[in-house]
Image (spheres, rainbow, N blue to C red):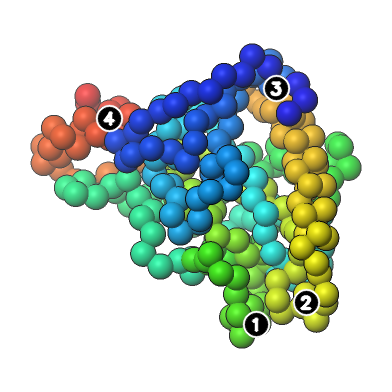
Amino acid sequence: MPGFEAHEEVVLDTPFGAPSDAYIVGTLEGKQVAFLARHSRGHRISPTELNFRANIYGMKMLGVSRILSLSAVGSMKEEHKPLDFVLPDQFFDRTKGRVSTFFSGGIVAHISFADPVCPQLSQVVHDAAGKIGINAKPGGTYLCMEGPAFSTRAESNIYRSWGMDVIGMTNLQEAKLAREAEICYLTIAMVTDYDCWHEEHDAVTVDQIIQTLNQNADNARKLVREVVRDFPAARTCKCGSALKHAILTDRKMISPEIKEKLGLLIGQYTGE
C-alpha cells in the first residue's frame, strides 16, 4: 500500500487460538496501523471457518483502538451500484451457531448493541470519502449470511422485502466482538455486484467481478490512507467503555482462570 512504511509481520497466539494470519504492523501517515487478511493471504479460510475471536483479540493485544473492516458485498438495492461504498449502521444476523462473544464458561456480559458501529468513525470515513471523490453512502443494513454458498433467488428476494441494503458473510461477528473489546468498529462495504435478485445478475461474468474487486481495492487503499490521516486523537464515542456496565457476574465469582484469559478485556473492571 503506498505510504505504508516500516512494516513488519507480527505472529500472535491468543487465548482463543491463532488469528487468520500474521498481522502486518507499520506506519501510515505517521500513525501506527495493523492489517489482517481475515481470510488469510491467498484467501484460504472460508467465512464459516474464521476464528473471529482470535482475530479481534489479536487486534486488542496490539493496542488497536479503531477497526476499519473492508468487505466485498452484494447489493440488495438498485441504488447501491457496483463500485459504490456503503457504510452500514445496522446488521441483521442470518448465521448459524457462530461464536460471537468472548464471555462464556463462567462469566456473563451483555453489551449494548442497538447501534453496532462507531458513529465517530463513520463520520470520519464519510467525510474522507467525499474529499477524494469516492461515493460512500452512510447508513443501511448489512445482512450477514452463513455462506459459503451465495443466496438462493428466493432468499435474496425475501431479504430485499425486509429492506436489507447489502449482503456479506463476515462482519456481524466482528462488530459484536469489537464492541466487547471496546474497539471502535465500522464496515466499509464495497459493492462488487448485485445479488441474484437482479435481472442482470446471470449476465455478470467472473472477469467483470474481478475487475470491480480490483478497482474497489484501489479506492479502498486511497480511502484508508485519507481516513488514517484524518483520525482525531481522541475518541468521543462510547465504544471505549462498552463493558463498564455490561459484566453482570459477581466479581467474587469470576475464576482466576477467566481473569487471566480475559484480563486484557476485563482487568480494569475486576480490579486486576
Separation of marks 3 and 4 at Cα, in angstroms? 32 Å
Question: Residue 159 is drawn in which quadrant?
Answer: bottom right
Q: Position of residue 60 (x, y in %)?
A: 43, 31
- Please tell me the numbered disc located at residue 244: none
Q: Name the kind of residue labelled 2 in the image.
A: Asp
Separation of marks 4 and 1 at Cα, in angstroms? 46 Å
- Please tell me the numbered disc located at residue 263: 4
> Callout 4: few (<14), some (14-19), or many (20+) C-alpha neighbours within 10 Å?
some
Residue at 86% over, 37% down? 132
> Callout 2: few (<14), some (14-19), or many (20+) C-alpha neighbours within 10 Å?
few
Disc 3 is placed on an element classified as: strand
Q: Position of residue 94 (x, y in %)?
A: 49, 69
Camera-side residue of 122 and 48: 48
Q: Position of residue 128 (x, y in %)?
A: 78, 36
- Please tell me the numbered disc located at residue 153: 1
Q: Nearer the viewer, mark 3 or mark 4?
A: 3
User: How many numbered badges does the structure rendering display?
Assistant: 4
Q: Name the kind of residue labelled 1 in the image.
A: Arg
- Does residue 80 lie above or below 216 as drawn? below
Q: Which residue is mark 3?
A: 4
Camera-side residue of 60 and 23: 23
Separation of marks 2 and 1 at Cα, in angstroms? 11 Å
Q: Name the kind of residue labelled 3 in the image.
A: Phe
Residue at 82% over, 47% down? 215
The answer to whether residue 105 is visible is: yes
Outermost residue, right direction? 133
The answer to which of marks 2 and 1 sits earlier in the sequence is: 1
The answer to which of marks 3 and 4 sits earlier in the sequence is: 3
